[in-house]
Image (tube, rainbow, N blue to C red):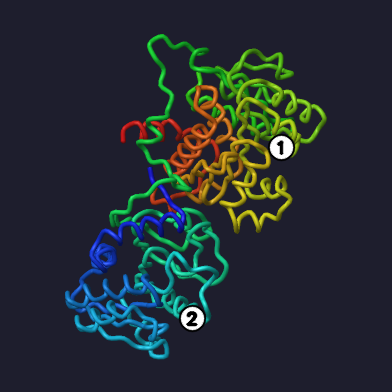
Amino acid sequence: MRQAHSVETIRTAERALMAALPDGALMQRAAAGLAATCAEALCRVYGARVVLLVGSGDNGGDALYAGARLARRGAGVTAVLLSPERAHAQGLAALRASGGRAVTPAAAGPLIARAELILDGIVGIGGKGGLRPEAAELAAAATASGATVVAVDLPSGIDADTGELHGPAVRADFTVTFGTYKPGLLIDPAASRAGALRLIDIGLALRDPVLEALQHADVAALLPTPSAESDKYRRGVVGIVAGSERYPGAAVLAVAGALRGGAGAVRYVGTGADAVLARFPETLVSAGPPAKAGRVQAWVVGPGLGDGSDARQAVAEVLAAEVPVLVDADGLRLMEREQVRSRRAPTVLTPHAGEAAALLGASREEVEAARLASVRRLAAAYRATALLKGSTTLVAEPDPDTPVRVNPTGTPWLATAGSGDVLSGLTGSLLAAGLAARDAASVGAYLHGLAGRIAAGSPIAAGSPIVAADIADSLPAAWRDVRSA
């Protein structure tokens, strides 16, 4: 499992470790890992043109020491010092002793344009706000140069704790981060600036992560597995209240996700029964209301439900049940906040940014700019597990001390009509199979994203267009992929 820690926690761990090590040893560890990654990124080190963008403080020192290592291997290394009088003195001396040189930003233009690799050491994890004008100009020139850009610890200008952007920031091809991941490297919009991540272990003793990202092994350990005594009811039954005359496809897609989510049976309630049975004859259908559909271990309500009084009543009836409930799409608009807050059984809310904005009384732009803060606010306001869908899907609990989970799988091709309906059914089925709300939401998002990748074909941002049914059809392959890891 990947974990990310706050700047305060990292600073405390760094101080404790530095007190036990010789002076400068921690920076040398970081610089060694950074230089090794830069060497891998270059086709050859000897004769390569390398430019360091160096700010004040330890982040610039890391860049200077790494540059010195590359210079000793024959690279032509030039440091652009944004604040020459505040540059890390020992790092600068090491660079010069190794054959590197230093210039001011006024002389940087031609050097950046010819560089093969640019090392971003402008601002470290303590930076707040976007880059200042002179640094922003260098960052833009680095992007325009076509050189490989490697960020030191994190791209300069992003918010390490939140993943927010408050102005210009470096756009890196690689980020070499030290000790632990920073939340800003895993959450958009800042994560989109980080490129490929490389974690260098420098010996920090860290506790209390603020963010987690499941990996294959974590998901495999959570997947429900039937025993020899299992039957369809022991494996769990999930109820789906979805679809309408206008949106019958939402019912079909939600059921598709649910059937592949680990529960033993799916009960469908709604007007889309004919469409559901035509595609999935194994579904147990009912005209409703939900309370008379039969026993279930979890409910999913909302996809394609519409706006009528019957839909509102169905949402209220499902929320009154004493089993876990997932609310999505139209259900998010129709639910009563106090009914959600007063539930004793687990509740999972799965909005996209626009739906979350409506629930929070904010704008979509505000939610997308501050995804971590928004998902935490949503979970606390509704006393529910909140799954905020988007370019980085986040899962938060009402307890502020519980780490938020960020989903590492997915592809831009998942942005297609009905994709969220499949996710709702899948996650609801995991709830019915016995997973806790946080685990069901995290595993559902993980499998959904992985299925999207499989359906589209790798690499992640390439491949081909897909439709929601392709995602559902690829869930068995995603499940097998996780199990076989």
What residue is shown at x 45% (from left), y 68% (from top)? 171
SS of the residue at dot 2?
Answer: helix
Residue 447, compared with residue 20, is above or below; it is above
Quarter occupied by residue 101: bottom left
Query: Earlier along the polypeptide chain: callout 2 or callout 1?
Result: 2
In x, y percent, where is residue 474?
A: 45, 35
- Which residue is label 2 attached to? 137
Quarter occupied by residue 314: top right
Amino acid at circle 2: Glu
Q: Judge left or right: residue 473 versus residue 350.
A: left
Between residue 413 and residue 182, name the one nearer to us: 182
Residue 419 in view of the camera: no
- Counting other residues with Cα less than 10 Å from the Cα at mark 1, is it few (<14), some (14-19), or many (20 or more)? many
SS of the residue at dot 1?
Answer: helix
Q: Residue furthest front?
A: 19
User: Residue 330 bears which disc, if any?
Assistant: 1
Quadrant including the C terminus: top left
Q: Residue furthest bottom?
A: 106
What residue is shown at x 34% (from left), y 85% (from top)? 111
Amino acid at circle 1: Asp
Q: Residue furthest right?
A: 309
In x, y percent, where is residue 95?
A: 25, 80
In x, y percent, where is residue 425?
A: 57, 30
